[in-house]
RNA sequence: GCCGAAGUGGCGGAACUGGUAUACGCGCUGGUCUCAAAAACCAGUGUCUUUACGGGCAUAAGGGUUCGAAUCCCUUCUUCGGCACCA
């Protein structure tokens, strides 16, 4: 008769962790007889210590995995480490250690922490992206992309984090700051490697439609990020230079109202345009100044639009009008053509700039209800729908029609062409860092960029490289790494010294898990065909764009190589909420973290898992409460005690027909719990309400007295067994122990069948009907099920309380919701 | 500014397709046990009113639809998330 105590829990948890590990019970292989289910959580950066966010993420995943196992699925549930990245370098600088050594030590710690949480991983598939056996395939993928023209090198202005001394992808710049160190990002002209993700823009957008089981908001975020917009590229001739200046607009209906044209300061035509002009110095000055302002400042600080006249004019193709060409900071080089036609009457930005610079206005759309808009009265741009005016043959059309007609007309007359514009840009993957995958390219003066021959892979990251965090890519200092012979012509050549962004590594790890030990190929096609797609993916919302978009891109690439048969990698996506303490996100910098390890050593992994699942639905934020875990502990202790004290090994059995009132009640609750919890676990993962139902069942069991009756005792036994089975995915250690005590099974509870319920047991002799008068609840009645309106009327109107409320009043209506409610309207 | 999500006791949160608002847990109050405390167990716990029975009022605020609204519609407010000089 053991008591549920800290020591006992420690003994039990260690015992079963050892049992699972020694027998490798979560190891899976293809099994054509069983349906597969692939559960995956976003793998961690191995910082050494797990935090509550990890605990929550992985506990949710573990419950799903274990539930699916009990349902008889062949469950793949792997774990690994996103092991390249800057923290290892920072640690190396700080402690003067080798990043590899530091990383592998952290991985060992992480693995131990996962073990202590009792997660059901197939450890045989474990991987770390910093292993040459993994990053070799990063390099292979890169070369395949290079061969297909999807990886290319380009010189351009890139996002540069001066603190991390490396470039960043657009997705890594948040509010003009570096996603990792939060410092301001600059622009810098560099030659860098890009992946042509834009090749897949349309598919990435379209296939969002396939993702029925993704949160809507994630899909919307991706849709906005991809940012497709339809419009017209209009050709403005610039007489001065004999050049055509293309301009993109989504509002061709306003073309007759264009009164000037604006170029981005970085626009390549600017230099030509001002050459020899009296404005040359002024414009050069302005361009220089604008370039030197950091992105975040240009976005946040002074929002007043600044610009200068170039001295040149452009011709509006629709009416031959000459309008001035300006350069202004409110036009972005990165979007569209880097130049716009300005319509101050119908675009608020143009309006503000025009007012600042006293540029002319012309209304071309009038409010159809009150067509009295005048240029001189305007306080802001008119951006609503309306009717075309001052627009030649298009006058009188609604602007929606105008938009279509004018666009088609310009396209036909070759004044412009119908175009689609995307916000999504190619993915910059070069990083001037050490701890990452070397980009497997060699530069030869004669042959250009030449990939490392496939049979020479991997290009191993050299050891003993000095990492200072300063002076550019550390590999650049490593002579024997840099100097090589060109694989094509054999002449002296140089190796690329940049490494890959770590998001490259994590864009395909879910495929590698399918055959993670395969050293002949990137992954086994046959294994991937069986396991893919991931059925349930779980991770933080912070990856809504970055990682999830890149992974979708990679999957489509592999599909086009003929290596996978799916369009999309993740069938269902669950984004778990953050863990808060005192209303704030738990974080090291806030100093409000709770160490999972400390909680485990006091309460055990089971109580921690239970609390985290009970406190909030998985998608919501979770407020950590030190007292709350006491409640989980108390509940587990009650289950434990029930199994010790109330469970009695006996031969007797019972059937539904044998049961009397209170027994029937308990049997009903037991069956209802199975039904309710199964539903909660399947639709939307409502673990919190599933657990509360188990608490309700335990409360009923505690009140129930078997009193030595063998049939009642059999019912008590069955109820306890049901609780333990239903609880097993949540708190596996305690449940294994209790299950073994009660049943002495041959295998783990993880593979014991999930219980089923008997619909008959849910039937009731009487049902509760609520009686309302004028919509207000006045009394409750126990009546036979399926009572007719007449029967109910008979019973209810006789009731004293009801009488009091309806006395002397005319009954207008008698509304009946069968077996539920009656409303008397008087 | 645009797009999206959400506002329910002292707290975390329940409430299926409109049908008993506040399940379950935490906290709190009282009690049993104890010399005492902790633990455990039992009872109570939205708010106002009433000795009590009973009533009135409550799901961010206001209005509407309905026999009946936390749930549907409109207006407003607040919080959170994303995008943002995207032409």
Image (cartoon, coloured by chain):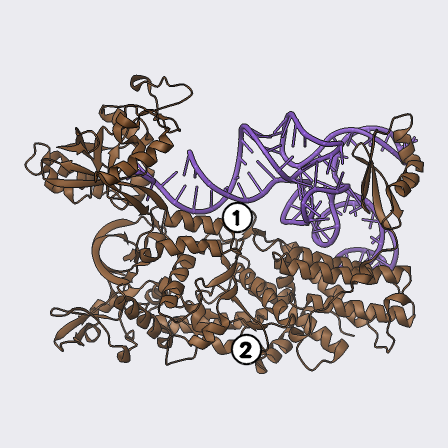
Chain colours: A brown, B purple
Q: Residue at x 85, y 49 (%)?
A: A786
- Pick the front one: A491 or A648: A491
Q: Position of residue A435 (x, y in %)?
A: 32, 67
Q: Is residue A202 above or below residue A718?
A: above
Q: Which residue is mark 1?
A: A584
Q: Residue at x 26, y 26 (%)?
A: A392
Q: Which residue is mark 2?
A: A28
> How many tags in the picture?
2
- Pick the front one: A133 or A364: A364
The quarter of the image holding the N terminus of chain A is bottom right
Q: Is residue A706 above or below residue A591?
A: below
| Left or right: A491 in relation to A148 | left
Specify the label residue A463 is tagged with.
none
Chain identity of mark 1: A
Q: Is residue A464 above or below residue A259?
A: below
Q: Secondary structure at mark 2?
A: loop
Residue A815: quadrant of the picture: top right
């Amino acid at each position: 008769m053991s008591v549920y105590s800290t020591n006992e829990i420690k003994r039990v948890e260690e015992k079963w962790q050892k049992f699972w590990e020694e027998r490798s019970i979560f190891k899976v292989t293809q099994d054509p007889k069983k349906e597969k289910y692939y559960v995956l959580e976003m793998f961690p950066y191995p910082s050494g210590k797990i935090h509550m966010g990890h605990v929550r993420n992985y506990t949710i995943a573990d419950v799903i995995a274990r539930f699916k196992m009990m349902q008889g699925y062949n469950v793949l549930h792997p774990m690994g480490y996103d092991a390249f990245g800057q923290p290892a370098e920072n640690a190396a600088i700080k402690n003067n250690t080798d990043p590899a050594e530091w990383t592998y030590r952290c991985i060992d710690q992480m693995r131990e922490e996962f073990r202590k949480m009792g997660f059901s991983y197939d450890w045989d598939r474990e991987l770390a992206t910093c292993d040459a056996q993994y990053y070799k395939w990063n390099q292979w993928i890169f070369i395949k992309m290079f061969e297909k023209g999807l990886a290319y090198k380009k010189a351009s202005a890139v996002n540069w984090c001066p603190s991390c001394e490396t470039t960043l992808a657009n997705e890594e710049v948040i509010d003009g700051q570096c996603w990792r160190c939060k410092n301001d990002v600059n622009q810098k002209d560099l030659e860098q490697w890009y992946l042509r993700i834009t090749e897949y823009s349309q598919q990435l957008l379209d296939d969002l439609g396939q993702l029925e089981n993704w949160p809507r908001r994630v899909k919307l975020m991706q849709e906005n990020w991809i940012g497709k917009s339809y419009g017209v590229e209009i050709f403005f001739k610039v007489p001065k230079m004999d050049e055509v200046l293309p301009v993109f607009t989504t509002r061709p209906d306003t073309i007759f109202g264009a009164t000037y044209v604006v170029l981005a300061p970085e626009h390549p035509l600017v230099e030509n345009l001002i050459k020899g002009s009296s404005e040359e110095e002024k414009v050069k000055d302005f361009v220089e100044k604008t370039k030197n302002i950091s992105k975040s400042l240009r976005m946040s600080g002074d929002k007043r639009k600044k610009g200068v006249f170039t001295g040149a004019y452009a011709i509006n193709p629709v009416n031959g009008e000459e309008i001035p060409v300006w350069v202004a900071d409110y036009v972005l080089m990165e979007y569209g053509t880097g130049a716009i036609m300005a319509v101050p009457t119908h675009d608020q930005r143009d309006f503000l700039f025009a007012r600042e610079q006293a540029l002319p206005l012309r209304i071309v759309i009038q409010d159809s209800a009150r067509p009295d808009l005048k240029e001189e009265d305007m306080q802001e741009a008119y951006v609503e729908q309306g009717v075309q005016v001052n627009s030649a043959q298009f006058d009188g059309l609604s602007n929606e029609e105008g938009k279509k007609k004018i666009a088609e007309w310009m396209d036909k007359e070759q004044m412009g062409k119908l175009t689609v514009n995307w916000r999504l840009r190619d993915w910059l993957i070069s990083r001037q860092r050490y701890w990452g995958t070397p980009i497997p390219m060699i530069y030869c003066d004669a042959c250009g960029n030449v990939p490392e021959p496939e049979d020479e892979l991997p290009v191993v990251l050299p050891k003993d490289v000095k990492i200072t965090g300063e002076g550019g890519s550390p590999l650049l200092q490593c002579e024997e790494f840099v100097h090589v012979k060109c694989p094509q012509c054999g002449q002296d050549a140089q190796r690329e010294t940049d490494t890959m962004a770590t998001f490259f590594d994590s864009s395909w790890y879910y495929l590698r898990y399918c055959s993670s030990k395969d050293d002949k190929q990137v992954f086994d096609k046959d294994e991937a065909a069986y396991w893919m797609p991931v059925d349930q993916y779980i991770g933080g919302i912070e990856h809504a764009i970055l990682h999830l978009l890149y992974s979708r891109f990679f999957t489509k690439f592999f599909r086009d190589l003929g290596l996978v048969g799916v369009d999309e990698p993740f069938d269902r996506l669950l984004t778990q909420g953050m863990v808060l303490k005192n209303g704030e996100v738990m974080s090291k910098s806030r100093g409000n973290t709770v160490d999972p390890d400390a909680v485990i050593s006091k309460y055990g992994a089971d109580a921690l898992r239970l609390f985290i699942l009970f406190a909030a639905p998985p998608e919501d934020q979770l407020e950590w409460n030190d007292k709350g875990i006491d409640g989980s502990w108390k509940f587990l202790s009650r289950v434990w005690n029930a199994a010790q004290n109330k469970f009695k090994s006996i031969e007797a059995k019972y059937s539904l027909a044998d049961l009397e009132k209170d027994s029937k009640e308990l049997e009903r609750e037991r069956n209802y719990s199975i039904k309710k919890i199964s539903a909660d676990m399947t639709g939307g993962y409502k673990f919190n309400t599933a657990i509360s139902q188990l608490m309700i069942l335990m409360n009923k069991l505690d009140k129930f007295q078997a009193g030595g009756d063998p049939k009642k005792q059999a019912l008590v036994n069955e109820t306890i067994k049901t609780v333990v089975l239903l609880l097993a995915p949540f708190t596996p250690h305690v449940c294994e122990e209790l299950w073994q005590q009660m049943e002495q099974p041959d295998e783990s509870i993880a593979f014991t069948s999930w219980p089923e319920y008997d619909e008959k047991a849910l039937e009731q002799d009487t049902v509760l009907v609520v009686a309302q008068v004028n919509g207000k609840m006045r009394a409750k009645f126990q009546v036979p099920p399926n009572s007719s309106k007449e029967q109910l009327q008979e019973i209810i109107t006789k009731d004293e309380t009801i009488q009091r409320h309806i006395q002397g009043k005319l009954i207008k209506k008698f509304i009946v919701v069968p077996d539920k409610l009656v409303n008397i309207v008087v």
